[in-house]
Image: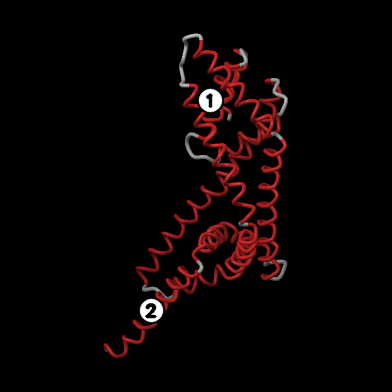
Amino acid sequence: MSVAGSPDRYVVLTTILIIIAAALAFWELLGVIILAGTLAVILLPLHRRLIRVINPYISSFLIAGLVVLIIITVIGFTLSIFYSHADYVWYLIDTILTWLTALSASGLDPVGASELDEWILLQIDMVSKWATGLLYQAPMILVKIVVFLIALMAFVYKGDDIYTEIVESLPGRLSAGVKEMSQTVVGTLWAIYVVHLATALITFLLALPFFYFLGYDYVVFYATLAGLFQLVPILGPSLLMIFLGVYALSIGDIRSAMLIALVGYPIV
């Protein structure tokens, strides 16, 4: 009995050791592979529909390619928006700091202007270092994109088969538990990816008319900011509205500050 069972233990132990060794060897790519796997979970329903009319391999390739194209397009659009409005961002920050300095000089110092100035410069320096680091990491980023594409294709193409083999290899009670847990995982991933991204997109679309009627010059820029901040849990939209409210006060635009507080905050 023990002899018959020992090979299975050796196989399991060897498999675990191989997985651990592979994870350590490709640690930098592990996050990309996990991201591809979690995305594949919510893309499998689309794959199941497509394979009714086209080859499964072609379906997985089209889905993975479309996902990568969308991600690159969104990131490129966002970076281009920020790059083209870099001077305007500096203007906003300088206007707020000048206003705070004037308040401090007049005896009204609701916020330490010098401390805020240092904090803003620190954040700008961190962003600058991050952007410079991206240039040096360009080859690795390209490798990660390729690995993500291949992993996503593989998970979409063989996802159902992998899941079926795992479930069928488990005892009955454990198999039922895994099936129930998988439903919870799918629902959670759906909320994280689809619902969260849909909320950000809706926020972007609602922000366009809001900032337009508010009289802002760079409507797309502000709408993009609103959509991005929506992806930051809990405090994201609030931070943007606070920043815009402070800027409105710094230029004496009480009307805009009130609209941001009463209309913009609930919408964005």
Q: What label sits on residue 12 in the rendered view?
A: 2
Q: Position of residue 139 (x, y in %)?
A: 64, 61
Q: In which quarter of the image is residue 246?
A: top right
Describe residue 55's horizontal placement relative to residue 16 as left or right.
right
Image location of residue 189, percent across then percent down: 51, 53
Other-residue count near label 1 (Cα within 10 Å), few / some / many at <14 / 14–19 / ≥20: some
Work out whether residue 91 or residue 18 is closer to the camera in this orientation and state it.
91
Q: Residue at x 46, y 56 (%)?
A: 185
Q: 40 or 17: nearer the eye?
A: 17
Q: Residue furthest left?
A: 2
Could you say whether the residue bearing mark 1 is in a helix, strand or loop?
A: helix
**191 and 94: which one is in front?**
94
**Residue 240 in the figure: left or right of residue 11:** right
Q: Which residue is drawn at 31% across and 86% down?
A: 6
Q: How crowded is mark 2: few (under 14 residues within 10 Å), some or many (20 or more)?
A: few
Q: In the rendered image, which residue does mark 1 sit on? A: 242
Q: What residue type is labelled 2?
A: Val
